[in-house]
Amino acid sequence: MDYTPHTTDDVRAMLEALGMQELRELFADLPEALLEPELDLPAPMDEQAILAHLRELAGRNASAAKAFLGGGLRPHFVPSLVPALAQRGEFLTAYTPYQPEVSQGVLQAVFEYQTMIAELTGLDVSNASLYDGAAALAEGVLLALRQTRRMGVVVSQGVHPEYRQVLATYLHAVGAELRTVALEGGLTPPAEFDDSVGAVVLQSPNFLGAIENPAPWVEAARASGALVVYVADPLSLALLKPPGEWGADIAVGEGQPLGNPMNFGGPQFGYIAVREKLARQLPGRLVSQTYDVDGRRGYVLALAAREQHIRRAKAKSNITTNAQLTALMGAMHMAALGPEGLADVAAASVACARALAEMLARLPGVERVTPEPFFNEFVLRLPRPAAEVRSELAARGWHAAAPVPAEYGENLALFAATERHDEDDLAGLTAALEEVLQ
Amino acid sequence: MKRDFPVIFERSRSGRRGTRPPRPPEVDLAGLLGAENLRSAPPRLPEVDELTVVRHYTNLSRRQVGVDTNFYPLGSCTMKYNPRVNEAAAALFTELHPYQDPETAQGALQIMYELQEYLAEITGMDAVTLQPAAGAHGELTGMLLIRVYHESRGEGEQRRVVLVPDSAHGSNPATASMAGYQVREVPSGPDGEVDLDALRAALGPEVAAIMLTNPNTLGLFERKILELIDAAHYQGVQLYYDGANLNAIMGWARPGDMGFDVVHLNLHKTFSTPHGGGGPGSGPVGAKAHLAPFLPVPTVKREGERYVLDFDRPQTIGRMRSFYGNFAVMVRAYTYIRMLGAEGLKKASAMAVLNANYLRKKLAEVGYKIPYDRLCKHEFIAQPPEGLKALDVAKALLDYGYHPPTVYFPLIVKEAMMIEPTETESKETLDEYVEVMAEIARRGLEDPEWIAHTPYHTPVRRLDEVAANRKPVLRWRPEEG
Amino acid sequence: MNIPEDRRYTASHEWAKPEGNLIVVGISDFAQDSLGDVVFVELPEVGREVEAGEAVAVVESVKTASDIYAPVAGTVVEVNEALADEPELVNGDPYNAGWLFKIEPADASAYEKLLDAAGYAKVVEEES
């Protein structure tokens, strides 16, 4: 099955117009030695056959719709209208809105998304999206280094370990120095920064789920001239004091909890928001309101001179394709739920996580490591390696106990709960864990 | 009186509710979370009912064109049909968490493993990572592979320069900078191909890599590619293949056979996954064996009948993305490759090249200039007839229901219009497009006032971009509404 | 194209004009015209030491961004703050109100080595 509409007559007529007899002539400018390699690929399939094949593959996966797994990515309720609207062909099959007259749909939706993210983070300006939380963090830190013209970065160990790994990869490339401050009792201890430090990074709720007090880091950064990059789960911001109010300069995070399925880890979207004075340092696309020649309000891509297609080697970032549709799903989700609905989701997640943590910590040999207060993820110390426990729980139909990297301690497991879990789910997981640990 | 299309915040009414999530239990949030940690006021998100949300976005979508609505020959972007079966396929795999026990995600891991194998086969490379989230992200991954490779040989300090042709995508030099390199531009010759002598002269012990697109951004195959790569390899220079234009040569030639050391692909271009108004995409990277030890972790490996995530790569460049990449995009590309097979991919490229050459020929017949008028691959550069501007032709096309080509790129051609029809457009579509282009040229030359003020029939007309860039308004505020 | 004779120029289209012991720097009428509507000017930090030919500022239009090079070596002592709100001054009055920055030159004679109006006119002629 292919999707070419050409009939035999079409091909003949078109070749004729080019003075050619056969398709091979279209590749006459390639070195003969390269031509027509035999590709060893499976035989073609029609639509019915591929769907049957994929269903069989899907059957080899266990649904994580009720997973108690976290790390910034969780099963959350998504209103049915979100995927329905996102699948509209006009949104799905457009590309970057370089022709604003016929791209007002995407442009206005992005403008609204930018506004929602700014509101959520308590900052002034959001861009149109980045790939994911980790890339958003790396870009946020690079932005801070550009602005401060410094090459030092201090990151709390409370930041998601995979984000820190991505950050390390990006920083190695530009020769910046990365220092990690270890957690103490599950929280980021106060730190001081010298004048080589351009960016300090902390996450709240942190990787262990604990809500941090960012004030000491913000004050220390102010004193040394560094900018504060704050990693925040956007759902938590429905309830918690936003990064802007804490005094952060840059907020970044993973957008999945806003209207996106887990998708085995991707795609979702990364967000980044900054204070007004940093807007021209932002990587990626930005949409601005403006007016047309008849005085009608409309939207265009703005400040493109920051970007790779104009600034080339001196661009703020190399990013072009971002995570537009998934970010718009986030916007649709926020529009559908509104501030109250989003707060309800967050509150239900918090309450559910609290109840689960209490139930699980009562099991013998199980101890909560995450200090209070925590949001909707938490870490338990188990009597055995988490990977084993996860595997045995999975055999009983429960997805929980994600292994926490050893840098945080031995036998630690990450749990999460959301509004998708009910009392039976909590009791079921507790019973299964009890059985596994006996 | 023309009314502005409202932003969703203007449709908001205090206290109105949309979708109701599960009701939370009565809890003391201040007690659970700490009163000092709570927001002083809720975020000012819109308060709208469901029907308003549905109508708002549905009507917004009607102010937007996509491949599903219009011919969209946007050069370098491969705006081919995005099969609906891809969407059905992706929907089978949404409820998977990256941290679930890999034993319970064997189907997903098998897709990733097989896709790695297919992409390696299609490109002629030895190993593939699926982690990069988009083409430019793949570029950065690939350049870091090269960097760490040189470092591993003790040449990291010495090789500080990356060569990029002046016709390259802007992301190439931007990527080289992000990878910590200095960028040196190599001029194109009068034939539109990289000037081999200039390139030879630019090679040296300080050069780490050359980033090339082949066919290049003019749509021309670099005919001296084998000599060029030999000359570079002789000097220890690595060859990077920007796969943005792979749609031209699938099944006809492979970058790996040309001698490239590393390649990135854009699954959202070549492999039919939707562009989503700007993303998400996916940018897998293929590497030759000598670069494979440096690939980001994890990759997917097969052990007997099981598929496992392989983190054991001591020389890795590290991680490029959280989790495993844009899996749902991979599922779509996997579906596409399995449906087309080797013959289908080869035919897709042949039809893409046939369409481009046919259009090149026909547009030349109606007065458009073709600065490099020879056999092209999947795209070509045209210029409007003397007296017209590419921008105005683009704006006029909007009124006729076409998405314009890429304009003013590549930078080395004045008034460039970069046209990529793709293989999924029929001969009738191309013929009608040529008629419209002819009419625009004729009418534009006769009536300069008309073309200078096009479009007339779009949701908005030409917008004040100068104001938007001088005093950008990047969010809605009540007082501005 | 307006090329005043009371100052000197570079081949990269900056102008330089002595003012006391300082050199005022801007871009030529030809440069502003080729850039189109200027939307933003990124200016150097006051106090920055610059080499002759070093990229020290950026003038942006909607679809391009051009580096501005220091015509002479020295220290940036003042920048045109008015451009933050009115970048269009660079278009409307490139030789006066649209100036970019002032340099205290490291070597007072460096100015003399720049192109005079006639020399710059030839550069413009070749490029247009």
Image (spheres, coloured by chain):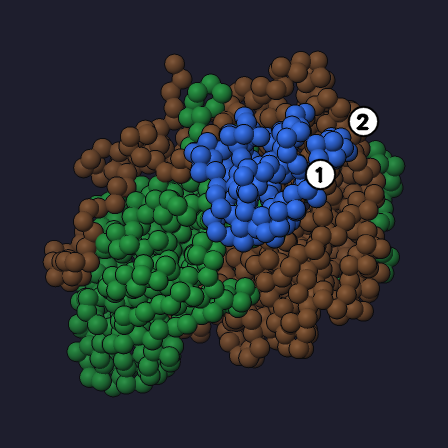
Chain colours: A green, B brown, C blue
Q: Is residue B275 above or below residue B426?
A: below
Give the residue pinned by disc 1: C115
Q: Is residue B256 left or right of residue A127?
A: right
Decide: few, some or many residues near mark 1? Use Cα within 10 Å; few <14, some 14-19, many ≥20: some
Q: Which element is circle 2 on?
A: helix
Q: Residue at x 47, y 49 (%)?
A: C45
Closer to the camera, B92 or A106? Answer: A106
The answer to whether tags 2 and 1 share a subunit is no
Chain containing the residue with disc 1: C
| Disc sitting over residue C101 in the figure | none
Q: Nearer the viewer, mark 2 or mark 1?
A: 1
Closer to the camera, C69 or A110? Answer: C69
Q: Is residue A227 left or right of residue B450?
A: left
Residue A341 image offset from top left, x and y in percent: 23, 47
Residue type for callout 2 = Glu
Res A39 quadrant in image: bottom right
Q: Residue at x 35, y 62 (%)?
A: A224
Give the residue pinned by disc 2: B365
Can you say which quadrant of the picture contains the C terminus of chain A?
Answer: bottom left
Residue A107 image offset from top left, x and y in percent: 46, 36
Residue B68 visible at all: no
Residue B413 visible at all: yes
Closer to the camera, B446 or C93? Answer: C93
Q: Is residue A11 left or right of residue B49?
A: right
Chain containing the residue with disc 2: B
Res B5 quadrant in image: top left
Residue A217 image offset from top left, x and y in percent: 29, 64
Residue A390 image offset from top left, x and y in percent: 35, 76
Closer to the camera, C37 or C83? Answer: C83
Res B82 quadrant in image: top right
Q: Residue at x 76, y 33 (%)?
A: C122
